[in-house]
């Protein structure tokens, strides 16, 4: 037990330190004032039951510092049961930007986010497709930052940073810190050309590359993770053509789940795709993270029962905390949330059993999401 614990924590430390160093080396990307965008962009927003939020996002898009003749917005509605499309239709009457509503219920057998994304890509006229979610908020230079990175480096796939906002409770602030670690690991892994994760609330890719790699073909039965599986496919063909947009002006803001059940459902949804990863490097990262947390979790009762020396358990736990602190300090500074670093302390008490339980629950691949029962095959 002791050697398994020390080996797993050592592997975890090596993994995180590599990504800490990669994040340090990653160049920031900011469009200068002289930059003249020349890329036709289509913003695709797959939505379901977002009447409360979609109006604010559309206003953010209207305020973009981006040439309107180069901007198209496609709102793809996935059978919403509220007033999402009505709110968008009212906005269209008053705006000067090009916004179109696409209703999946106008087509036969088109249901779910993957179908919404595919239909959006099919109907898009832009060269670069930029994606976000209906409950997100964006800054006025969001699209300029994507266009600048695209025009200067010509990547086929761009992952952007996402952060929680309006975190008023201890629970929400702990989530912000945990979520920041996921964003940081995803961005740093892209820098290492070993991509493992991204977030569909802030990413972009070209219409050409989506069609070239066959879109979501091969992952149709997996309800979650369409963005990550596409990232893996593109990276496999063009490892030097995927990038992370390290720009504070490109941060997309969203809301943390307000309740524990909602949080668990979200994380189980994310975890449900892990067993379907085919990239061995991605699988290895998931195994290392799970193993380190599993053995730290088992070490507590083992130490209490005298099966493991406290001298082995406590240093292993201290090393993991120190590595996490080092990495999170850098990521939270980038997100302008460094004051939240203190919430790493209460997070450590629940993070280890949380990772173990959510990972195991995700293996079943079954969960409720937005009024639907989802089961990955």
Image: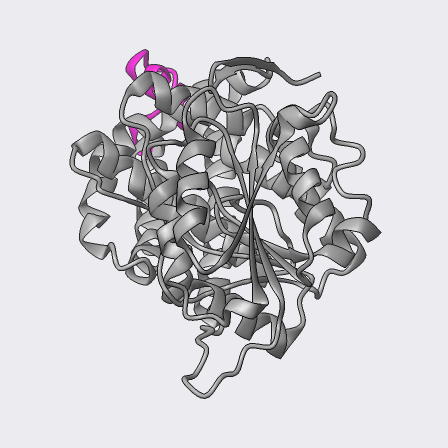
Above or below 327: residue 306: above
Q: Residue at x 49, y 51 (%)?
A: 202
Q: Residue at x 66, y 60 (%)?
A: 126
Give the image location of residue 272, x and y in percent. Answer: 58, 23
Give the image location of residue 138, x and y in percent. Answer: 37, 55
Residue nearer the viewer, 38 or 255: 38
Q: Residue at x 33, y 46 (%)?
A: 56
Above or below 113: residue 97: below
Q: Among all residues in the image, which is located at the extreme front?
A: 93
The answer to which image quadrant residue 345 occupies is: top left
Give the image location of residue 150, x and y in percent. Answer: 61, 70
Residue nearer the viewer, 361 or 281: 361
Marker count (numbered): 0
Residue nearer the viewer, 183 or 344: 183
The answer to which image quadrant residue 119 occupies is: top right
Q: Quadrant of the C terminus?
A: top right
Q: Residue at x 33, y 36 (%)?
A: 317
Residue nearer the viewer, 182 or 4: 182
- Does 96 sit left or right of 107 as displayed? left
Q: Does the magenta-highlighted stretch encompass residue 298?
A: yes
Main secondary-structure element of the magenta-colored stretch? helix
> Magenta segment range?
296-311
Asked whether residue 163 appears in the rendered view, the answer is: no
């Amino acid at each position: 037990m002791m050697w398994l614990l020390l080996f797993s924590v050592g592997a975890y430390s090596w993994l995180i330190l590599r990504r800490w160093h990669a994040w340090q080396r990653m160049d920031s990307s900011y469009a200068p004032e002289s930059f003249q965008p020349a890329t036709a962009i289509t913003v695709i927003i797959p939505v379901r039951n977002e009447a409360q939020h979609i109006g604010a996002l559309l206003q953010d898009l209207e305020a973009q510092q981006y040439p309107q003749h180069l901007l198209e917005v496609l709102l793809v509605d996935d059978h919403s049961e509220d007033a999402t499309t009505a709110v968008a239709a009212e906005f269209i009457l008053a705006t000067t930007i090009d916004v179109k509503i696409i209703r999946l219920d106008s087509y036969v057998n088109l249901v779910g986010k993957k179908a919404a994304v595919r239909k959006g890509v099919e109907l898009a006229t832009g060269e670069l497709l930029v994606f976000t979610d209906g409950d997100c908020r964006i800054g006025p230079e969001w699209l300029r930052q994507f266009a600048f990175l695209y025009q200067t480096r010509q990547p086929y796939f761009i992952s952007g940073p996402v952060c929680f906002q309006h975190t008023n409770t201890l629970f929400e602030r702990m989530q912000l810190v945990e979520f920041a670690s996921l964003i940081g690991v995803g961005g740093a892994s892209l820098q290492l050309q070993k991509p493992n994760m991204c977030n569909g609330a802030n990413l972009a890719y070209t219409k050409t590359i989506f069609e070239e790699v066959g879109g979501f073909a091969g992952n149709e039965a997996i309800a979650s993770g369409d963005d990550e599986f596409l990232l893996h496919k593109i990276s496999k063909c063009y490892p030097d053509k995927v990038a992370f947009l390290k720009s504070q002006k490109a941060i997309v803001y969203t809301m943390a789940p307000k309740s524990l059940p909602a949080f668990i459902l979200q994380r189980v949804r994310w975890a449900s795709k892990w067993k379907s990863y085919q990239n061995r490097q991605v699988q290895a990262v998931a195994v290392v993270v799970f193993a380190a947390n599993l053995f730290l979790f088992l070490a507590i009762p083992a130490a209490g029962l005298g099966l493991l020396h406290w001298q082995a358990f406590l240093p292993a736990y201290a090393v993991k905390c120190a590595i996490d602190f080092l990495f999170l300090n850098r990521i939270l500074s980038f997100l302008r949330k460094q004051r939240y670093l203190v919430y790493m302390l209460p997070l450590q008490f629940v993070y280890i059993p949380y990772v173990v339980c959510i990972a195991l629950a995700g293996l079943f691949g079954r969960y409720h999401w937005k009024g639907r029962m989802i089961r990955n095959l």
